[in-house]
Amino acid sequence: MSDAPSRDLASLSGVEQLRLALTGEGAIAPIAQTVGFALVEVEEGNVVFEATPTRAVYNPLGTVHGGWIATVLDSACGCVVHSMLKPGQAYTTLELKTVFHRALTAGTPVRAVGRIVQMGRRAAFSEAELRGLDGKLYATATSTCLVMTP
């Protein structure tokens, strides 16, 4: 895992930057290691992360903390916007809404799939689902991002 980009990222599109991270040739956000998720698929308008929560992220009720789930979904929503950026563009999240559909427990492998709803010049709208490998839906999120062009 590299923590420093090997080339000038500003000259690359967002999907090119994410593909470098996917192959280990580019920077991976430190939050991925901290929280324990990995980017496993990327194309323009679609990203997939995989993760398996541990008891270390439990809430007092004995299930995975909503903040862990929201972080994984925020990454899927944000990275799918990132996948649509032109060279030199950047984005920041303006809003994230998370809906929890069922409790998640440690050791349950999940996939967060993010997709673009609408990509505008200044605003991007994305959504993500967190599902178990058995197809069970654990949470969904929607996001609004500000797209910045120099």
Image (tube, rainbow, N blue to C red):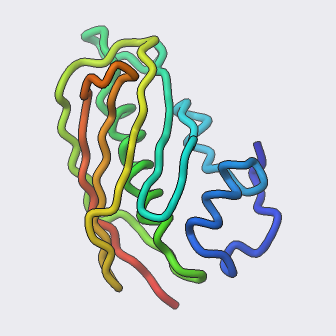
Q: Which picture quadrant has residue 148?
A: bottom left
Question: With respect to residue 54, does 126 lie above or below?
Answer: below
* Extreme residue toward the bottom, this view: 150
**Residue 61 place in picture, x, y as percent:** 25, 10
Considering depth in this image, is 72 or 20 the residue closer to the camera? 20
**Residue 95 place in picture, x, y as percent:** 26, 60
Instruction: Determine whether, in the image, residue 50 is placed left or right of residue 134.
Output: right
**Residue 136 place in picture, x, y as percent:** 26, 23
Q: Which picture quadrant has residue 4?
A: bottom right
Q: Residue at x 21, y 49 (%)?
A: 97
Question: With respect to residue 148, does 76 lie above or below?
Answer: above
Q: Residue at x 55, y 46 (%)?
A: 41
Instruction: Determine whether, in the image, residue 70 is placed left or right of residue 35.
Output: left
Q: Residue at x 61, y 50 (%)?
A: 29
Q: Which picture quadrant has residue 26?
A: bottom right
**Residue 44 place in picture, x, y as percent:** 48, 64
Q: Residue at x 41, y 68 (%)?
A: 92
Considering depth in this image, is 16 or 68 the residue closer to the camera? 16
Question: With respect to residue 71, does 135 lie above or below?
Answer: above
Q: How many marks?
A: 0
Instruction: Determine whether, in the image, residue 46 is placed left or right of residue 60.
Output: right
* Extreme residue toward the top, this view: 62
Q: Quadrant of the N terminus?
A: top right
Instruction: Determine whether, in the image, residue 72 is placed left or right of residue 27.
Output: left
Considering depth in this image, is 56 or 81 the residue closer to the camera? 81
